Image (spheres, helix red, strand yellow):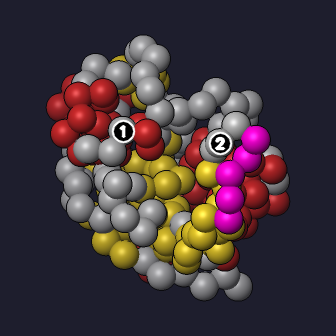
C-alpha cells in the first residue's frame, strides 16, 4: 500500500488537502543540446504514479491514484455531491486529472461533472512565478456551465498543487458563478515550494 503524507492546502474552499509531495529532491545534472537544464528527480511513490500517468500514460497508475485518493476520502469524509476536475493545461487524450476524478467519483458514487473548461489559451501557469501574475493570467481563462452545480457540494480535484492560484480561480467560479453550496479541494500531489 502506498503511504501518503496529507497536508492541508489553503484556498477558497471549506477544506482542502494535498495527499503528498510530488518529489523529494531534484538535482541539476547538466544541460541538453539546446541548453535546457536536465534534472534527476527523486519522487515520492505517489509522485511517481502521477508522473507515470501524465508522461507514460499508465492506465494502472490512474486506478492506483484513484484508489489511494478514495482511501483518504473515506477517512476525511467530506460530504460531497459531485466531483469536478480542474481542466488540464495541455491537451491530452485522455486527460490524466479526468481519469483520477472519474475513478474518485465512481468510488464515492457521485456524479463526475466536467463543467469547467478553458475559455482562451494562456501560458503554462508553472512558468509564471509570481502569485499576483498568476492570478492575472487566470482571470477570465475558464468558463463554467452554471446550472450544473447549483446547490452542490463539490469535490474539486487536481493532480498537482503549487501556489493554489488555479484551484482558487476555479473554486471562485464554482461558488460565485455556478452557485455551488460549498467546495472541498483535493490535490493528489503538491510541489515543495509555492513558486
* Spot occupied by residue 158 in the image (x, y as percentages of width and height): 48, 50
Query: How many numbered marks are there?
Result: 2
* Helix, strand or loop status at disc 2: loop
Quick check: can you spot residue 10?
A: yes
The residue beneath circle 2 is 35
| Residue 65 placement: quadrant | bottom right
Q: Quadrant of the N terminus?
A: bottom right
Residue at 41% of width from left, 15% of height from top?
A: 119
- Tell me where residue 164 appears, x and y as whole percent: 31, 51
Q: Is residue 150 left or right of residue 66?
A: left
Determine whether 61 is above or below 23 in the image: above
Question: How far apart are labels 2 and 1 at the CA level?
Answer: 20 Å
Q: Residue 86, percent across and down?
A: 46, 40
Whether residue 118 is situated above or below residue 93 in the rendered picture:
above
* Towards the viewer: 16 or 43: 43
In this rendered view, identify the residue nearer to me: 97 or 132: 132
Q: Main secondary structure of the magenta part?
A: strand
In this view of the protein, which residue sits in the foreground, 178 or 68?
A: 68
Where does the magenta region start and end? 29-33
Q: Residue placed at 61% from the left, 64% from the top?
A: 28
Q: Residues within 10 Å of mark 2 (few under 14, many from 20)?
A: few
Question: In which quadrant is the C terminus drawn?
Answer: bottom left
Element on which disc 1 rests: loop
Residue under the image location 65 percent in, 42 percent down = 35
Q: Which mark is residue 184?
A: none
Q: Is residue 161 magenta?
A: no
Q: Residue visible at 33% across and 59% down? A: 194
User: Counting residues from the N terminus, which is met first, the one under dot 2 or under dot 1?
Assistant: 2
- Residue at label 1? 128
The part of the image, by quadrant, that contains residue 24 is bottom right
Amino acid at each position: 500500500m502506498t503511504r501518503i503524507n496529507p497536508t492541508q492546502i489553503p484556498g477558497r474552499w471549506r477544506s482542502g488537502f494535498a495527499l503528498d509531495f510530488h518529489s523529494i529532491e531534484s538535482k541539476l545534472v547538466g544541460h541538453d543540446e539546446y541548453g535546457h537544464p536536465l534534472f534527476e528527480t527523486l519522487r515520492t511513490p505517489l509522485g511517481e504514479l502521477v508522473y507515470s500517468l501524465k508522461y507514460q500514460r499508465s492506465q494502472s497508475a490512474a486506478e492506483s491514484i484513484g484508489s489511494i485518493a478514495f482511501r483518504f476520502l473515506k477517512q476525511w469524509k467530506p460530504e460531497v455531491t459531485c466531483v469536478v476536475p480542474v481542466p488540464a493545461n495541455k491537451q491530452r487524450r485522455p486527460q490524466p486529472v479526468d481519469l483520477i476524478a472519474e475513478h474518485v467519483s465512481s468510488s464515492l458514487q457521485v456524479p463526475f461533472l466536467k463543467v469547467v473548461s478553458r475559455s482562451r489559451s494562456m501560458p503554462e501557469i508553472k512558468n509564471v512565478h509570481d502569485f499576483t501574475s498568476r492570478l492575472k493570467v487566470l482571470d477570465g481563462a475558464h468558463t463554467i456551465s452554471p446550472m450544473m452545480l447549483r446547490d452542490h457540494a463539490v469535490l474539486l480535484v487536481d493532480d498537482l498543487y503549487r501556489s493554489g492560484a488555479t484551484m482558487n480561480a476555479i473554486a471562485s467560479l464554482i461558488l460565485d458563478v455556478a452557485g455551488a453550496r460549498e467546495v472541498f479541494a483535493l490535490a493528489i500531489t503538491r510541489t515543495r515550494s509555492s513558486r
